[in-house]
Amino acid sequence: MNQGIDLQGSFVRLLTELGLPSGAAKALWLPLPMVVILIGATVSIFVTVWLERKISAAAQQRIGPEYVGPLGTLQAAADGIKLLFKEDITPAKADPILFTLGPAIVVIPVFLSYLIVPFGQNMVITDIGVGIFLWIALSSIAPIGLLMAGYSSNNKYSLLGGLRAAAQSISYEIPMALAVLAVVLMSNSLSTIDIVNQQSGYGILGWNVWRQPAGFLIFWIAALAECERLPFDLPEAEEELVAGYQTEYTGMKFGLFYVGSYVNLVLSALIVSILYLGGWEFPVSVSWIADLIGVSETTPWFQVIAASLGIMMTLFKAYALVFLAILLRWTVPRVRIDQLLDFGWKFLLPVSLVNLLLTAGLKLAFPVAFGG
Amino acid sequence: MTLAEGVQLVAFGILVLMMVGSALGVVLLENIVYSAFLLGGVFISMAGMYILLNAGFVAAAQILVYVGAVNVLILFGIMLVNKRQPFAPVSQAWIGKVATGGVCAGLFSLLTASVLNTPWAISSETPIGEQAIVEIGKHFFTDYLLPFELASVLLLMALIGAIVLARREFIPDTEPGEPETEALQLPERPRELVSSTPVGDGDR
């Protein structure tokens, strides 16, 4: 099995050769991947906001941001700076503690979930055994922050928005978890690395999307609902609720909601690409490419190229999904709250249960294809 | 002391402070919404304890079930019930308070005594770590099968009960001739008033 490159090992070895004790070298290594991922996640907001603005402009036959930086790429930075300088208002009779804590509780779990997103064989902050389950658990914390924000704003629209957001994310978490469970059944592991490795070897044909088409759709719909993207952006439906739980927020507290929603969108896209689209795998198998150009898979330069192309592949798949989400946002009308809950409980939940049952049955019947 | 031990010690201290502090807050604060949010804090710090004890799966399950489901439902309940009642002062309320305090102190001393007297057998085996999920699964389907199935049946009963309660047709106690008040018509779906309307009233 191709072990990929071991950045941690090389870093620690380099520092110990320079005379540091190995404990100190490891302690120095620890914050590095976290900082890199944090920066990456933050940069992904800028990219996604720019994409959203440009694609929505194209969908509506406008030009979109044009003057801020080349092609308007710095528009998101300008937005961020504007939010930083806005006055931070806490409404009268609002609950100041909960009002401040709410956005933080929404954002922190999203960033924490990047712990388990792999960009390559060893390109992950930590390959923990519970892997994808940790993401499901962390994403269930966000409703508390939304309820907190909705409750503390002292505004009925905010409270309604917060309650809607919580109801929505509880309802769609269940089909999503069941879809994940079907994938986990096939890969015999909760670890994201193992899930990707189980899809490798046959190029595009080995990806889970072919074995789990229903699961893929269920997961994607549920992920859109969890991110509160249109057609499921009920909590902030502006015709009914002004802006839902965000109504009373200004300045950087509003900015945190904004950041949280975009980071969550990118995170969901990354998770979909890991679970169903083969993560960092290429459409053609790596060993086949290695055979074609006649080098061994373990050649250092080939490994470096393959690893960096793998990161590109992961990001490419994720951003293709982000593009799809944005396109959906500007083409599909919003559903009603009763339609949303009906769809979640009466359609997605039974379908995902049947999908799980079918996967279990197929796994017993065809252990070769469905990971016996 | 290695780096890992130091981190464990500091994390343990922070978690204990968080847990005890928020648990006291749950009990002592007047505002029930604060109590509900702090309950989430208690659950999260308990999950942190599980992580310190090398039980990652239990920690994630704790967050998913207790924080993500139980606590959110408690908050939901609090926020959807908007019944404001003036607090009626009870005469001789101190008896109840003294009795509660006595019971709590008794429980505390009992637990302290049992904690101090139990010979805690700390296992010296190395924790299985990542393999824990597999072990938990095996236990669920062998020696803990009955409790596992009983819990599932209990949850199924709760599920069916919730559906029955939610589908209940709300029939107000009104006299046959009396027109319905508007307050009773709003919350539920319009229904056929076949039996309660006088004959010849038309095709409602």
Image: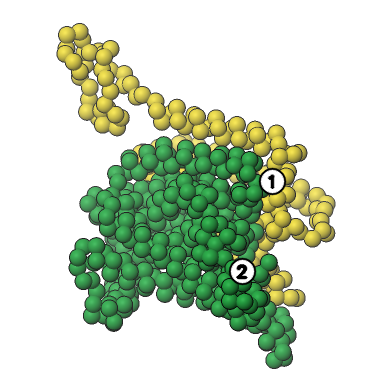
Location of residue B147 in the rendering, given as x and y in whole percent from the top left corner: 68, 36
Q: Is residue A20 left or right of residue A244?
A: right
Q: Looking at the figure, which quarter contains the N terminus of chain A? A: bottom right
Mark 1 vs mark 2: tell me if same chain.
no
The local crowd at label 1, few if under 14, some if 14 to 19, many if 20 or more residues have their Cα within 10 Å, is few
Q: Identify the chain drawn in green.
A: A
Location of residue B123 in the rendering, given as x and y in whole percent from the top left corner: 81, 56
State whether residue A106 is above or below residue A308. Answer: above
The image quarter containing residue B42 is bottom right
Colour of chain B, in one word, is yellow
Residue linked to disc 2: A287
State whether residue B80 is above or below residue A132. Answer: above
Q: Chain letter of disc 2?
A: A
In what element is the residue under mark 2?
helix
In what element is the residue under mark 1?
helix
Residue at 56% x, 35% y is B155
Count of numbered circles in the view: 2
Q: Amino acid at mark 2?
A: Ser
**Foreground of the two, A331 or B77:** A331
Q: Chain letter of disc 1?
A: B
Q: How are the colours assigned in the image?
A: by chain
Residue at 47% x, 63% y is A270
Whether residue B38 appears in this view of the structure is no
Residue linked to disc 1: B137
- Distance from disc 1 to disc 2, alpha carbons, whole Å, reads 35 Å
State whether residue A100 is above or below residue B147. Answer: below
Q: Amino acid at mark 1?
A: Gly
Whether residue A189 appears in this view of the structure is yes
